Amino acid sequence: MRQIVLDTETTGLSTAQGHRIIEIGALELDNRRLTGREFHRFLNPDRDIDAGAEAVHGISRADLETEPRFPEIVEEFLAFIKDAELIIHNATFDVGFLNHELKLMKHKKPTIEDHATVLDTLTMARKIHPGQRNSLDALCKRYDVDATKRDVHGALIDSELLANVYLAMTGGQRALLLDEESGDGYVDPDVAGHHADESTQTAAVIAVTDLPIAKASAEETAAHDAMLEKIRKSGACVWDID
């Protein structure tokens, strides 16, 4: 599955007041793994930035005078997100601004939903953690995602934080610090469940049944229990017998 974790920064809070996008940051996930591909642009909004917004992201109008305008980068952006699932925290806000930009330039496909599907992690978090604070900052703390390097909000760094929160919230891979390059035989349950074909799964079962069975030591059992406790922080743990 190809997913794009996306965030924007704007001149203010409302498109009805003429506010515009000034930064887009997006990271690509493929089968729940960051690929290293990203889209990042600052944009000239041709208007002032509200003081409250500038205090949040630290971007001034002067910083953007030589940056391109949205119509100049739109096709590159749409190509990057094409047919992907967009993962956005409080998607109503970001999608609303992106649609506003598309409509202002009279794009032939004037809504983001014409180009990609959208998953709102704020809605997801509210279902998993009802009655709790579910801002990105709160979720970073809840899932032990390190946000200490962020002095101000930025579209690209917030996308990176959201990617880690999303993976932790939906499976725990990031929160558990699993090393996908270690070659230790770990297989993501989501990847195995949805992408392995029947013949591959059958071969794996046959191979496993021929292996000798070794009981875990007391230290290994304790380490296993500690790992399960970390998984429980992400929600239900499928390895809990009871």
Image (cartoon, rainbow, N blue to C red):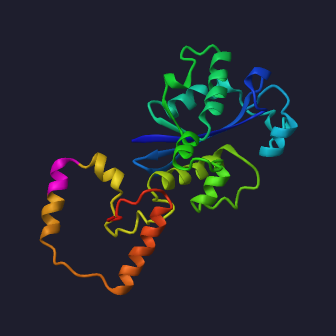
Residue 60 % position (x, y): 84, 39
Horizontal side of residue 68 vs 171, given as left or right: right
Q: Position of residue 3 (x, y in %)?
A: 47, 41
Residue at position x 17%, y 48% from top?
A: 198
Residue 236 image-quadrant placement: bottom left
Q: Which residues are magenta?
A: 197-202
Position of 137 compared to 231: left or right? right
Image: 235 above or below 41 = below
Q: Is residue 216 left or right of residue 222?
A: left
Q: Quadrant of the N terminus?
A: top left
Q: Position of residue 135 (x, y in %)?
A: 66, 47
Q: In the current view of this chain or complex, which residue is farthest to the bottom?
A: 218
Which corner quadrant holds the C terminus? bottom left
Does the magenta run of residues contain 192? no
Q: What secondary structure do most residues of the magenta stretch adopt?
A: helix
Comparing 180 with 164, the one in front is 164
Quarter location, residue 94? top right
What residue is at 67 percent from the left and 27 percent from the top?
97
Q: How many marks?
A: 0
Q: Residue at x 33, y 60 (%)?
A: 187
Above or below 220: residue 107: above
What residue sits 70% from the left and 61% below the top? 148
